[in-house]
Amino acid sequence: MPTLTIDGQPITVSKGTTVIQAAEALGIYIPRYCYHPGLSIAGSCRMCLVEIEKAPRLEVACYSQAADGMVVHTITENVRLARRSVLEFLLSNHPLDCPVCDQSGECDLQNYYMEFGLYQSRFLENKIKRRKAYPIGPHVMLDNERCILCSRCVRFCDEVSKSHELGIVNRGERSEIALYEGRELNNAYSGNVIDICPVGALTERDFRFQCRVWYLNRTASICPGCARGCNIEIHYNVLRPYQSKGKRILRIKPRFNPAVNKWWICDEGRYGFRHIDASNRLRECEAQTADGVIPLGMETALKTAAAWIGESIEQHGKDSVGFFLSPELSNEDLYAILKLARHLGISKIDFRNPGEHPGFEDNFLIRGDKNPNRRGCVELGLYHRQRENGGWMAEEIKQGTLRMLVAFLQDLSLEPEFKAALVSLKRLIFVGSNSNATSEQAGLVLPSATYAEKNGSFTNFQGRAQRFERALVPLGDSLPENELIARIAAHFRMPEQPFEREQLLLDLRAEFPFFDQSTLDPPDVELAYQTTIAQREHA
Amino acid sequence: MSLETLSDQLLAEISEILAKHPQRRPALLPILHACQRRNGYISPEIERAVAELLGIPVIDVREIITFYTLLLPKPVGKHHLQFCTNLSCHLQGAEESVAAACRRLGIEEGETTADRRFTVTTVECLGACDMAPAMQVNDDYYANMTSDRVNELLDKLS
Amino acid sequence: MEKILSKHFFNPEARRLSFYLQNDGYEAARKALTCMSPQEIIEEVMKSNLRGLGGAGFPTGRKWSFIPKDSPEPRYLVVNCDESEPGTFKDRHIIEWTPHTLLEGVMIASFAIGAHQCFVYARGEYVRYANILQTALEEAYRAGFFGKNIFGTGFDLDVMIHLGAGAYICGEESALLESLEGKKGWPRLKPPFPAVSGLFGRPTIINNTETISYVPVIIRNGGEWFSRLGSLKSGGMRLYSVSGHIRKPGVYELPLGTSLREIIYTYAEGMRNGRKLKAVIPGGSSTPVLTAQEIDVKMDFESLAAIGSMLGSAGVIVMDESACLVKALAVLGKFYQHESCGQCTPCREGTGWMTRILHRILTGRGVKGDLENLVRVANNIQGNTICALGDGAAMPMISFVTKFREEFESHIFHKRCTAVR
Ligand SMILES: Cc1cc2nc3c(=O)[nH]c(=O)nc-3n(C[C@H](O)[C@H](O)[C@H](O)COP(=O)(O)O)c2cc1C
Ligand code: SF4
Ligand code: SF4
Ligand code: FES
């Protein structure tokens, strides 16, 4: 365990710790381009040069290992000069097209220039012309003129996605990032290169020219795309919707979590937010009448829902009503439903289990189970009730014993047995965010909020219940499921209080010790994709 | 695309190279040299075939070919005239012989004659400053190149 | 002075094994393998004061002593015959005229460090010369000097000759290793040094062709004997490559410490066409240039260091009054711009920048401040790069501009070249 001194502050670190890491632990930020904690060390940008006493020249902090008695200075005149000169070298062939660059505001050339640069340019020569913005894959644009050859993207493709699409061709100042002709950057994790590119050389095709990054609001969330539950940040623009054609969410960025997704997310998750503002979003309550579908006010709709449930129980008994749940619901939603079901004595609860046909899976992040909260269902004791994919329910519907169903989120008609059975249902209430074949068949539709529009938690496959925060106001009349349930419950003389967020959690933990032991990850906003000075100061 | 691109002779040579190398990747440069000797340059087809053969990403092969100046991604003339223009040869007037060759062949530096017999390029130090101005034609070194000697050489090479 | 390596230069017979054997060939190797321990060999080489002749001048015996002892781990010897430093052509002479001396040195060095595999990395342009070496190697194999159980000692050694493919940077030892591993020549970060983790991550000793070629005579005549040939700290002889505006360019084998004046005027027979000497690069293009007033310097590591230059690869480039030093420096600038591997920022961006400034000055578009800027850029490269190519690009810039400032200023302010045509 070597003890070293950085800028006068002593610190003891484990063997193998680099100076840049040790400094970070002391809260001393050393500027860097090529260094990224999730990649191998390149030591090539030379931005992190520091003075180490007794060394004959400046050393790179990203590669130098802490040694006992080492004395490091990160703010001497020599260090300042070296940083400024590296910046000057990088800018010497840089197009300086910040006004039209999407990276503007989160660019480490800009940031470091403000912090360490500010020299008078002495560059009179012609700059090297290179290829400007062109797509290199479904999600990523490359601008060779802006590239500073830090090689992060190449190392990402070699070491993390292991897909080896990128290389640095040519030599010396003619070096540039390239793909083999006819190939594209099209791996399951390609979007991450945009996050790790310290400049505007790799940008998001989807986000291009949508919004200046300083207008973005950011909220910590959890990707609902699969059972991993990658920690993400939702970047949205509510103040200037005209800038992005009314789209509220502009991009998803990974949020660092060493235990779950490190610095990364998959492309599926990164671009999987489109349903949130999609045209099939359910914005208001609807009822099926003889004259077709009519909109309903929320109060009326909830009253109707409660009345239907009450009637059915009264006339045909508790077993005439079933709840068909979804592993896409949050722990809080599920628990609220459970509370209501218990209060009413309803025991016919099941899931549709699309996970029985697992989707694409790899040995990195992507899980075959595309539901964010199957583990939560299991821990709540709901999941084991699942039998033959809910087929038994279809059977009971056909037999006429199960007369009414409250279906959440999913399209039941995707199951052949259900497809046939649904017509025999006397009453179907659909609760969900987007319309589908089932919602179209439902007598009553209650619009619910998406994960971006509510607070809650998902339990990932590792058993981590991870909280997510509300980024957006629910669209139209939609409400989080647990609120809908709470308000239906009110019609059955259940008090509101047990459904309030904090109480729901307290009860959940008291009843299911699992949620007490399991780490309920706080959604601390740590940005994985950038560690720029501006943002650090902001934090 | 694939191994059919490589002739049987070349494949035999490649397996000989591979036999000498316990690991595959270190065989890459010797294999590319062999390919270029037989084919004159390294075409994209060869590039892909070699990548496949060694089980390495084709972009890696591209990196290598664009890094090392002796590996040629494009064909050159039958006689590749490479004039050293580094310091010692420059001091002895290397540029004159380059100009003489270009004049005689009617091409610019870096170009190949229409009949594909000659290519003229300038190169960095050949390690032959004692022969300055020095040049290399394919594998052979030539010393003390003056305009006259360039012309004599071109007569002989024709 | 008796020649060692150059004794039989230009005699084609000397390449043959039979000739070599008649001249006590492989006797030193036999002595080393049969009568000496690896430790004794290393000590003898230490005593000889032999220093690396590839450029850096690191004491060879000391380098060998870094190889881990008593470890079963395979280790390698790599011979650096990349010889791409402008002004240097001695290694080519060695493999062309006395290949067996190198091979005998390889045998002794391998035995000393416990290597059973040696790679000779020759620059790709040297095909013909590498073929001569290959022929010699095959001859030696047939005679049982390589392969299994050499001299009946149980020592096995294989040698493979590997051709580079056109990249000066592959002369830098860690780039060379990358190249041997089938990658592009991007120098590695250090430490670890190759003696600890080199080729394929194994302990590796890399030496210049000439360095290794002096090993047999050291074993034959003793380290002391060799050391006494040279000056106090730099033992022995070495091959000076002399080129430029000189009557007799060529390789001269002389004791370390011979004066530059002697080399130019006595051995290389003085300046061409009776012209006046203007400048000399003493140790290959990367070493700081000297003025005509500085040529009484002794050509050894310490003496050159004392006047702010370096012995480097001992490639002496002589320039007379007809040389335009702005052009000369621009030629060198272009070389480093062309040869920078592109890995690290200062060298990748700086070499091209300096060359563009020089080109502008050369074409009459120089402005006030250019020289300050040129030196500033060079200083910003120097010491801040991954490998010494950056330093090698910076040093000529700083020294040319400092020592011959008027010549550059004349180009900038009077648009006039002061070279005497
Ligand atoms: C850019 C660069 C080029 C070099 N080129 C050569 C070379 O061509 N031949 C050589 O022997 N050493 C060259 N060197 C020096 C080697 O890195 C290394 O120091 C040397 O091969 C060690 O052998 P020695 O100790 O016998 O000199 C070069 C170094 C640098 C930085
Ligand atoms: S594209 Fe971006 S990440 Fe890739 S090397 Fe260039 S600057 Fe670095
Ligand atoms: S100093 Fe130049 S040659 Fe050396 S690693 Fe850096 S870019 Fe490459
Ligand atoms: S961050 Fe250390 S060299 Fe790039």
Image: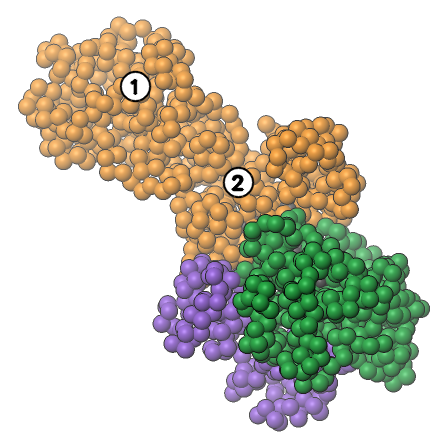
Chain colours: A orange, B purple, C green
CA separation, marks 1 and 2? 35 Å
Q: Residue A117's x, y, as percent?
A: 72, 43
Outermost residue, left side: A399
Q: Are marks 1 and 2 in contact (CB under 8 Å)?
A: no
Task: Give the amino acid at mark 1.
Answer: Leu
Q: Residue A468's x, y, as percent?
A: 42, 25
| Above or below, C168 relative to C198 | below
Tell me the crowding category of disc 1: few under 14, some 14 to 19, or many 20 or more residues within 10 angstroms, Cα based: some
Instruction: Write the residue at 30% across / 19% down.
Output: A380
| Above or below, A261 relative to A128 | above
The residue under label 2 is A38
Give the SS element for disc 2.
Answer: loop
Q: Residue C276's x, y, as percent?
A: 91, 78
Q: Quadrant of the N terminus of chain C?
A: bottom right
Q: Quadrant of the C terminus of chain C?
A: bottom right
Q: Is residue B132 left or right of residue A381?
A: right
Q: Which mark is residue A202?
A: none
Same subunit, tags 1 and 2: yes
Q: Is residue A384 left or right of residue A77?
A: left
Task: Give the amino acid at mark 2.
Answer: Gly
Instruction: Write the residue at 47% across / 22% down.
Output: A522
Q: Is residue C46 left or right of residue C153?
A: right
Name which quarter of the figure residue C299 lies in: bottom right
| Above or below, A7 relative to A511 | below
